Protein backbone atom coordinates (compact mmCIF):
# COMPACT_ATOMS: atom_id res chain seq x y z
CA UNK A 1 0.00 0.00 0.00
CA UNK A 2 1.26 3.45 -0.88
CA UNK A 3 1.59 5.69 2.17
CA UNK A 4 -0.34 8.96 2.07
CA UNK A 5 0.83 11.87 4.25
CA UNK A 6 -2.75 13.16 4.28
CA UNK A 7 -4.09 9.93 5.75
CA UNK A 8 -1.28 9.75 8.30
CA UNK A 9 -2.01 13.30 9.44
CA UNK A 10 -5.76 12.56 9.56
CA UNK A 11 -5.05 9.55 11.77
CA UNK A 12 -2.87 11.59 14.11
CA UNK A 13 -5.42 14.42 14.31
CA UNK A 14 -8.23 11.95 15.02
CA UNK A 15 -6.17 10.16 17.66
CA UNK A 16 -5.22 13.41 19.39
CA UNK A 17 -8.85 14.49 19.53
CA UNK A 18 -9.96 11.14 20.94
CA UNK A 19 -7.06 10.79 23.39
CA UNK A 20 -7.83 14.20 24.86
CA UNK A 21 -11.56 13.47 24.98
CA UNK A 22 -11.54 9.83 26.18
CA UNK A 23 -8.00 9.16 27.34
CA UNK A 24 -5.57 6.59 26.03
CA UNK A 25 -7.32 3.64 27.64
CA UNK A 26 -10.74 4.89 26.55
CA UNK A 27 -9.79 5.18 22.88
CA UNK A 28 -9.80 2.16 20.60
CA UNK A 29 -8.09 1.68 17.26
CA UNK A 30 -11.58 1.24 15.80
CA UNK A 31 -12.62 4.65 17.13
CA UNK A 32 -9.49 6.27 15.68
CA UNK A 33 -10.17 4.73 12.27
CA UNK A 34 -13.79 5.89 12.39
CA UNK A 35 -12.81 9.42 13.45
CA UNK A 36 -10.16 9.59 10.70
CA UNK A 37 -12.64 8.35 8.10
CA UNK A 38 -10.61 5.30 7.14
CA UNK A 39 -10.95 1.54 7.38
CA UNK A 40 -9.32 -0.23 10.32
CA UNK A 41 -6.92 -2.20 8.04
CA UNK A 42 -5.74 1.14 6.62
CA UNK A 43 -5.06 2.40 10.14
CA UNK A 44 -3.00 -0.70 10.91
CA UNK A 45 -1.02 -0.16 7.69
CA UNK A 46 0.18 3.14 9.17
CA UNK A 47 0.46 2.29 12.88
CA UNK A 48 0.70 -1.13 14.54
CA UNK A 49 -1.09 -0.03 17.74
CA UNK A 50 -2.23 2.88 19.93
CA UNK A 51 1.15 3.11 21.60
CA UNK A 52 2.78 3.83 18.23
CA UNK A 53 0.22 6.54 17.50
CA UNK A 54 0.65 8.07 20.93
CA UNK A 55 4.45 7.96 20.63
CA UNK A 56 4.29 9.70 17.25
CA UNK A 57 2.02 12.42 18.64
CA UNK A 58 4.31 12.83 21.62
CA UNK A 59 7.37 13.14 19.36
CA UNK A 60 5.63 15.87 17.37
CA UNK A 61 4.60 17.75 20.50
CA UNK A 62 8.06 17.49 22.02
CA UNK A 63 9.64 18.80 18.82
CA UNK A 64 7.29 21.80 18.87
CA UNK A 65 7.87 22.48 22.57
CA UNK A 66 11.66 22.19 22.10
CA UNK A 67 11.62 24.57 19.14
CA UNK A 68 9.43 27.15 20.92
CA UNK A 69 11.63 26.98 24.02
CA UNK A 70 14.91 27.37 22.14
CA UNK A 71 13.60 30.21 19.96
CA UNK A 72 12.45 32.10 23.07
CA UNK A 73 15.72 31.39 24.89
CA UNK A 74 17.69 32.80 21.98
CA UNK A 75 15.41 35.79 21.55
CA UNK A 76 15.78 39.45 22.42
CA UNK A 77 16.37 40.91 25.85
CA UNK A 78 18.43 40.16 28.92
CA UNK A 79 18.91 36.65 30.23
CA UNK A 80 16.09 36.87 32.78
CA UNK A 81 13.60 37.93 30.11
CA UNK A 82 14.74 35.20 27.70
CA UNK A 83 14.65 32.48 30.36
CA UNK A 84 11.18 33.59 31.42
CA UNK A 85 9.99 33.60 27.81
CA UNK A 86 11.47 30.15 27.21
CA UNK A 87 9.81 28.61 30.28
CA UNK A 88 6.53 30.28 29.37
CA UNK A 89 6.76 28.92 25.82
CA UNK A 90 7.37 25.38 27.08
CA UNK A 91 4.52 25.26 29.55
CA UNK A 92 2.09 27.36 27.52
CA UNK A 93 2.10 24.77 24.72
CA UNK A 94 1.37 21.94 27.14
CA UNK A 95 -1.33 23.86 28.98
CA UNK A 96 -3.03 24.95 25.76
CA UNK A 97 -3.13 21.36 24.52
CA UNK A 98 -4.34 19.80 27.74
CA UNK A 99 -6.79 22.49 28.82
CA UNK A 100 -10.18 20.97 29.33
CA UNK A 101 -9.03 17.34 29.05
CA UNK A 102 -10.03 15.21 32.00
CA UNK A 103 -7.33 12.78 30.85
CA UNK A 104 -4.30 15.07 30.96
CA UNK A 105 -2.84 13.22 33.93
CA UNK A 106 -3.17 9.86 32.17
CA UNK A 107 -1.72 11.14 28.91
CA UNK A 108 1.27 13.12 30.12
CA UNK A 109 1.70 12.26 33.79
CA UNK A 110 5.14 11.44 35.06
CA UNK A 111 4.11 7.87 35.82
CA UNK A 112 2.89 7.11 32.32
CA UNK A 113 5.14 4.47 30.82
CA UNK A 114 4.91 5.95 27.31
CA UNK A 115 5.41 9.61 28.17
CA UNK A 116 7.82 9.63 31.11
CA UNK A 117 10.97 8.79 29.10
CA UNK A 118 10.56 11.28 26.25
CA UNK A 119 9.31 14.05 28.54
CA UNK A 120 12.16 13.41 30.97
CA UNK A 121 14.67 13.59 28.12
CA UNK A 122 13.16 16.89 26.95
CA UNK A 123 13.37 18.32 30.47
CA UNK A 124 17.03 17.29 30.68
CA UNK A 125 17.82 18.85 27.31
CA UNK A 126 16.05 22.10 28.15
CA UNK A 127 17.68 22.26 31.59
CA UNK A 128 21.09 21.94 29.91
CA UNK A 129 20.19 24.75 27.51
CA UNK A 130 19.14 26.93 30.45
CA UNK A 131 22.35 26.13 32.33
CA UNK A 132 24.45 27.02 29.29
CA UNK A 133 22.56 30.31 28.96
CA UNK A 134 23.06 31.19 32.61
Image (cartoon, rainbow, N blue to C red):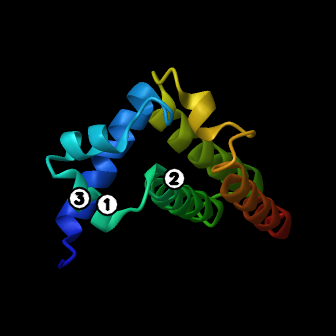
Residue at 51 percent across and 20 percent down: it is 102
Q: For the residue carrying disc 1, how many other residues have a C-alpha within 10 Å: few (<14), some (14-19), or many (20+)?
A: few
Q: Are marks 2 and 1 in contact (CB under 8 Å)?
A: no
Left or right of 108 in this view: 14: left
**Which numbered disc, 2 or 3, marks the residue closer to the eye?**
3
Q: Position of residue 36 (x, y in %)?
A: 20, 47
Quarter of the view holding residue 112: top right
Marks 2 and 1 sit apart, C-alpha to C-alpha, by 12 Å
Measured from the top left, where is residue 21 in percent x and y?
A: 39, 27
Cβ atoms under marks 1 and 3 closer than 8 Å: yes
Which label number is shown at residue 51?
Answer: 2
- Return the residue nearer the eye: 76 or 43: 43
Alpha carbon separation for disc pair 1 and 3? 5 Å
Residue closest to the eye, 4 or 63: 4
Q: Position of residue 71 (x, y in %)?
A: 56, 64
* Residue wearing tag 1: 44
Q: Name the spot of residue 55 as percent of width and height, x first.
A: 52, 57
Mark 2 or mark 1, earlier in chain: 1
Question: Element type at marker 3?
Answer: helix
Amino acid sequence: MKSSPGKREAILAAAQTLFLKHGLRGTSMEAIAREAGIAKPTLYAYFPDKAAIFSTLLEQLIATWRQDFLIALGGEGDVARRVGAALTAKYKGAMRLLAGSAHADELFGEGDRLAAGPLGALDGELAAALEAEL
